[in-house]
């Protein structure tokens, strides 16, 4: 029986298919190895805690997620209308004798800055830390106090 590709010698197609399969497999192996590696240095240096802000009972509340960080190692400052939180998550030294070691947590110094609404009094900012969450409370400017608007139905 003749080959469907008469101009090729029998057996030439299989090596090409094998090479293509190997190239695809190598690509996916490389992608898999990227996921298994530790985070690159640029990623650990550029991390920052998640922030959240809202109005509650006439106060502006800003929360920062800081699990595992000693609150004594965190500083808060207000310059103009810029609130800055700075600190460092220190890497715990761990000796592993055997087994697999995997790290996704980011370590190192961080700084997060957020713009506060006009009229916030920096002298009245109060900060508390509980269960890994830094909570800053300050009186909300009157312009931020929600005003209920009635809808007229016609």
Image (cartoon, rainbow, N blue to C red):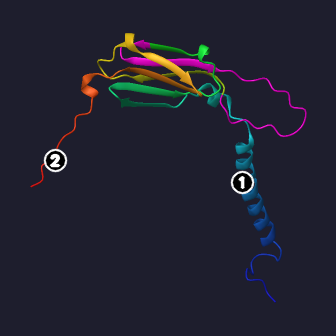
Q: Tell me which residue sits at (76%, 67%) in the image.
A: 17
Residue 55: % across, % down: 36, 30
Image vertical order of residue 73 relative to residue 61, above or below = above
Closer to the camera in the image, 30 or 106: 106
Q: Tell me which residue sits at (17%, 43%) in the image.
A: 150
Q: Tell me which residue sits at (83%, 74%) in the image.
A: 11
Closer to the camera in the image, 107 or 59: 59
The numbered disc on residue 9 is: none
Residue 87: % across, % down: 58, 18
Task: Single out the residue that lies furthest toward the bottom.
Answer: 1
Q: Please give the residue where the numbered disc 1 appears in the rendered image.
A: 28
Find out whether residue 134 is within the magenta segment.
no
Residue stretch in magenta = 78-106
Horizontal relation, residue 6 to residue 52: left or right: right
Find out whether residue 82 is within the magenta segment.
yes
Which image quarter: residue 92? top right
Which image quarter: residue 118? top left
Q: Tell me which residue sits at (62%, 19%) in the image.
A: 88
Q: Please give the residue where the numbered disc 2 appears in the rendered image.
A: 151
Disc 2 versus disc 1: nearer the observer: 2
Q: Main secondary structure of the magenta part?
A: loop
Quadrant assignment for the C terminus = bottom left
Horizontal relation, residue 19 to residue 96: left or right: left
Closer to the camera in the image, 60 or 80: 60
Residue 90: % across, % down: 69, 21
- Callout 2 secondary element: loop
Which image quarter: residue 130? top right
């Amino acid at each position: 029986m003749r080959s469907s590709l008469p101009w090729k010698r029998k057996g030439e197609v299989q090596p090409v298919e094998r090479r293509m399969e190997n190239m695809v497999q190598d690509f996916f192996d490389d992608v898999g190895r990227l996921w298994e590696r530790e985070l690159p240095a640029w990623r650990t240096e550029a991390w920052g805690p998640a922030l959240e802000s809202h109005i509650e009972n006439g106060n502006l509340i800003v929360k920062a997620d800081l699990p595992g960080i000693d609150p004594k190692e965190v500083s808060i400052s207000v310059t103009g209308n810029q609130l800055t939180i700075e600190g460092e998550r220190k890497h715990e030294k761990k000796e592993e004798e055997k087994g697999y070691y995997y790290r996704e947590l980011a370590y190192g110094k961080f700084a997060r800055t957020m713009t506060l609404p006009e009229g916030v009094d920096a002298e009245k900012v109060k900060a508390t830390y509980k269960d890994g969450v830094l909570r800053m409370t300050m009186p909300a400017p009157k312009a931020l106090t929600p005003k209920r608007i009635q809808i007229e139905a016609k």
